[in-house]
Amino acid sequence: MEWSPVPPALDRPATPSPLDLSVENAIKHHFDELNLLMSRTAEEGEGNVLAAVTFPKNSDAIACNGSAWQTLWLRMSFPTLVGLNSSKINAMFKPKRQERMRRQLGMETLPPGIDYVLDFTPPTEGSELADLTAALWLPKMVKLWFLAGHYCPEEILESGHLASIWDKRPLASRSVSAMLVLGHDDACRGLLPFCESRPPHTRYLYQLLTSYFAGSMDRSEWKPKAVPGIVDVDPETEEHSSYFPTFRRIPDYCGTRHRVAIMRVLHAINGNGLLLNSAARMWTVAQVAIHLEIPQVVVDPVTQWLIAPPNTKFVEICPERSFQLALALNIPSVLVAAFRILVSELAVDYAAPDPSPKRPALTWAQRRRDDYGDLPSDPVEYASHAFSERITGLLEMLRSNTVFDRIGTGLEEWALLKQQAMIVHEQGSDELKTAHENLLQALVGVFHNDIQRCLRENAPSGRLATLIAAQRSHYIPMHERDSLGHLYENLSHSQRALTPFFWESLRNQSLPRLSGQGPLSISTYNGYTIRTYVDKYTSLWKAANLSHPDFQPNFDMGELHLNHVSQRLDEFNIHQFESQVYTALTSLCDRVLGKGYNEEPFQFFLSDHLLLPSLTSPEMDFLPIWAGGLDDGSGGVFQDAIPPAEMGPSEPGPAYHTGYTIPTTGTRTSGTGTRDGDGDETIMMDDDDRVGGSIYGVSELGDNLDRFEIISTRTAQTATETATVPSMDVEQSVVTTTTTTTSSTGLGSGLGRLNLDPGGPNRHRVVAVPSSEISSEDFYLNSGEDGEYADAMYSQPAEHQAAGRALANYVDDHDGTTTGRSESGDASSSSTQGGVVAAGGRGAGGNDINGGGYSDTDNFMLEDDEDDGLKDLDGSDDGSSTVGADSDYDMV
């Protein structure tokens, strides 16, 4: 009788099995795939390319069917391989590589129909092997993930903590399918000791017999059983031997696993399908495809493996490796899910009173962290900082005295109290003023007490605590597990705000108050109820009978405030106030918790203790564009925002000029000494208002900018102007604003008019003449000019600098003097030296050919308001007269 080296699956005896059909199907697919890999010869198949993977001659690696691993062959198509656009594969077709590979395979003469031979055998030494070994090194959780096929979670995971139909989580309480996680390693260590124990001359026979009866292998390894979790063995007990057999202790790197994974990827290129029945196989196949620069071949099978419930728990238990894999294979759904988990956990660490410079080995909920590799700009780091600052900022807002102004819209009763405050402080008695102030303080104080009460609450108890305990038992060993209550007690208030428990508590206490019939009116502040404060104030307000046009109802015109149910429209209503405040608070909590958004694209089973950033939160901008973020690879998303350069950069090179920055050489002197502030007002702005990217010493910009005037030649009116000149300090990330008021006396000789394009890119550019503090020697027009200002006068503007070119052309065509009108209507000219030509144009200075000019003026820029008026760069209206953007300006 002649034994077949690879018995077909149909020869296995069909024995009754207690396993369900899914487990039996998993075993069948496992052996069928082995037969497919090992049965191919160099002559089978189609294609003019012969691919080969060889094994070491002294290898004792044995497959699950009992056969030793030998050289694997596969015929492939040349156009298919070239169409993959892999530089590594395309380099193998070069003549010298072909000669070397033929010698290695001993194929000096090619088989019929074969034009190329590709040897995909990994190297046995060198730097490439080191890189491959590092990439294929199995993470610890990957080696332990077979336990997910044995572990049976508690039933509460499927019903959720609300125990309602809306909180159902199908398959959450089931073991992961054997088809996904219970496959054996390619170097099967379950059969190796059995074969090695036989005499050498009978070993091959026993391999065949083992292969033939592989169908009768121990099926208990393919079905769920009692295990303590997806955790490593407990060193203090010996119970692990029953659920952690020796053959499951696979090595971190295995040459046999590596070689077989290469052949699996090649079969996937041929369209033969890719069976991923274990985490070790999934990881190895993915890394092989990444190394060969063909991730598109395996991205669909790997994605299906990661998002098939309940195997999604792998992403929640090991988000670092899931993030690394999804980033390399461009899997948006997995990347976003892992990213949200990592950001939520790390943000809690950043909010600690004394944060560690390094990431702690354990998260606050005791999940053991892994590594996701080094990235030039780590999106998790940036997003975690941003998320921590945003949520703690919301907490500070809730604890601030201006909470009712910032919590949201629709607080009409609070707006009513603020409007009444103006009348009370103008016309009211001291007693009424005191009652009004006491009411405001009491309302804010009671709200603050509610916030503090939620912050001081203990960790959740009851069904939610049981649910979270069942979730954490998946990945935390019993001897290391601490209670959630004890872990939550160790968190600061800022850290608690980064958990869902605080926001859920805040939301739950707000829901009964949405009707306005909650306990606010009977809440106490400084020993008195809110109702007492309200009654005291409203009685005094009615008695005072203060009138104001804004509060007089016009019944004839039908002007009634529908939201007010009290008899008088100007009477404060505590119940309406309560409803409006807690409606806004509930809306805020829903936004933070991500409620009310579209259905989650990823099913979370183990993350009820995490406050996950919502899919629309600004932290998601740090993700790549293909994952819904804003990172296009340039790194701009990780940099501080800079103001838009609507006029384009003013010069090439690394310097970036927004058009609003003006060069300076520092504080100048003009014969009377150095200017030092002159009592100007200084305003500090937040880091969010930072401006960067200038090579000049812009921190001193305000030192040489004093005053300016803009007078319309159409109206010929005199005006008193107030200018706000920003000085941008890049290094200190602040903006210093210098404010000075000057009165215009009329137009003198100077620059011609510039018609600004109201819709063009230069509609914001307004340039004025320099300050009188700058010495006349620096600006002497009709002599030998030198210095940077003189160079700027005669420099040719770039093509994109339309305003500068328009000014240059206009002045060249109208070289002369321009006169204005004084308050008396007579023509006048300035008597102060220091005329200048700005924006690249040339001009004449007044009646004095040596350069008559204007005093106390500087280069400055305004931007137009939405109503075509002018406003300061900081967005505020300085109260000065404004002229439409389409007007002609004389810049003085």
Image (cartoon, helix red, strand yellow):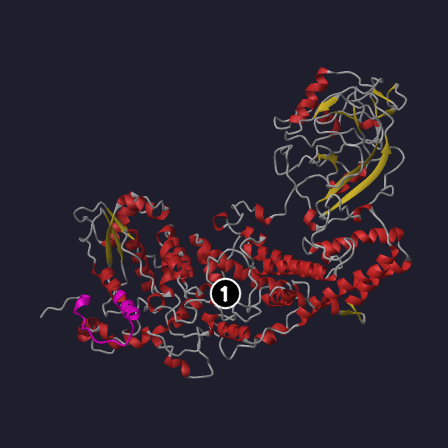
Q: Position of residue 150 (x, y in %)?
A: 38, 74
User: Which residue is depicted at the point 69% across and 70% down?
Assistant: 453
Residue 504 visible? The answer is yes
| 187 in relation to 621, above or below | below
| 722 in relation to 343, above or below | above
Q: Amino acid at mark 1?
A: Asp
Helix, strand or loop at mark 1: loop
| Magenta stretch holds residue 23 | yes
Left or right of residue 21: residue 379: right
Q: Which residues are magenta?
A: 6-29
Nearer-the-camera pick, 131 or 40: 40
Left or right of residue 668: residue 734: left
Q: Position of residue 300 (x, y in %)?
A: 37, 54
Quadrant position of the N terminus in the picture: bottom left
Left or right of residue 262: residue 463: right
User: Which residue is depicted at the point 33% across and 48% down?
Assistant: 89
